[in-house]
Image (cartoon, rainbow, N blue to C red):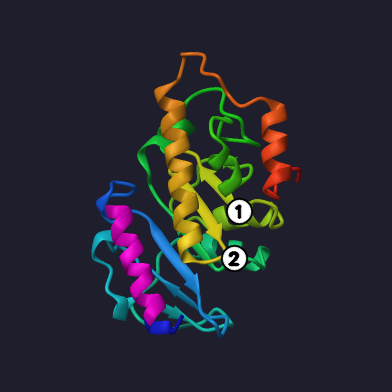
């Protein structure tokens, strides 16, 4: 994919997420790695529904801002994933309703935020780490991700929103949609004693689909 094609792809996928209500207003941010090691990043204060391919923030391989509009204030969060996960080709952060709602409820599992309701939540995300609340833009969010030493592809920022790293922009967007939909199922079945996947089911999924899980 050329740089221009990647710019277009970022904006198309971001608009799709916005149009379907996965994020709203000027919330959320998205980035993807270029072939030369640089990054394309959504600018600060922009809406996923109206990103301009020509105005995406551009960084070189050393992390220097070299073009486009001012980048999102959550750059420390994105950089932490790229620096600790060699397989990361894109990072997406949303303010999606059901995942945020689930993070507000008591008793959330910090090490494995999503309940085992469907195989795809496990296959696409592995274990999702629930991180505490940070002020938006706080570099401490990036440090918290670095503290995971690249062992998680997805985190949930309490009272804020999910962040997912994927091998490419499409994989990251697909995975974060799965996170939100699994959280939606968890909210819809809250207090109804749903039939969750058993530990044996989970292990079979993890082994059968080579899912990052035990770290």
Please state the horizontal and vertical placement of residue 7, each as a whole percent of the image.
Answer: 37, 76
Residue at x-position 55% and y-position 53%: 141
**Whole-percent x, y for residue 164 in the image:** 52, 54
Disc 1, SS: loop
Cα–Cα gap, marks 2 and 1: 8 Å
Q: Is residue 26 left or right of residue 37?
A: left
Residue 139: give x, y in percent of width and height: 54, 58
Is the stretch drawn in magenta largely helix, strand or loop?
A: helix
SS category of the residue bearing label 2: loop
Q: Residue at x 52, y 14 (%)?
A: 193
Q: Is residue 157 located in the magenta-colored stretch of the structure? A: no
Which residue position is annotated with label 1? 153
Q: Which mark is residue 88?
A: 2
Look at the image and say whether residue 17 sits in the magenta stretch.
yes
The stretch of residues the image draws in magenta is 5-18
Label 1 near label 2: C-beta < 8 Å?
A: yes
Residue at the top extreme, as displayed: 192
């Amino acid at each position: 994919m050329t740089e221009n094609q990647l710019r277009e792809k970022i904006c198309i996928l971001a608009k799709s997420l916005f149009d379907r209500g996965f994020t709203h207003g000027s919330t959320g941010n998205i980035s993807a790695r270029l072939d030369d090691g640089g990054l394309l990043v959504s600018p600060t204060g922009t809406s996923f529904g109206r990103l301009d391919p020509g105005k995406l923030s551009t960084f070189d391989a050393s992390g220097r801002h070299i073009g486009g509009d001012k980048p999102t204030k959550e750059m420390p969060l994105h950089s932490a994933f790229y620096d600790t996960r060699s397989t990361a080709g894109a990072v997406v952060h949303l303010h999606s309703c059901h995942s945020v709602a689930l993070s507000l409820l008591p008793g959330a599992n910090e090490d494995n935020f999503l309940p085992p309701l469907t195989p795809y939540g496990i296959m696409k995300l592995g274990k999702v780490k629930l991180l505490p609340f940070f002020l938006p833009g706080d570099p401490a969010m990036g440090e918290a991700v670095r503290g995971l030493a690249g062992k998680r592809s997805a985190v949930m920022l309490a009272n804020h929103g999910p962040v997912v790293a994927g091998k490419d922009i499409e994989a990251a967007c697909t995975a974060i949609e799965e996170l939100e939909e699994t959280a939606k199922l968890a909210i819809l079945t809250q207090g109804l004693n749903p039939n969750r996947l058993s530990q044996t089911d989970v292990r079979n999924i993890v082994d059968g689909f080579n899912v990052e899980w035990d770290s």
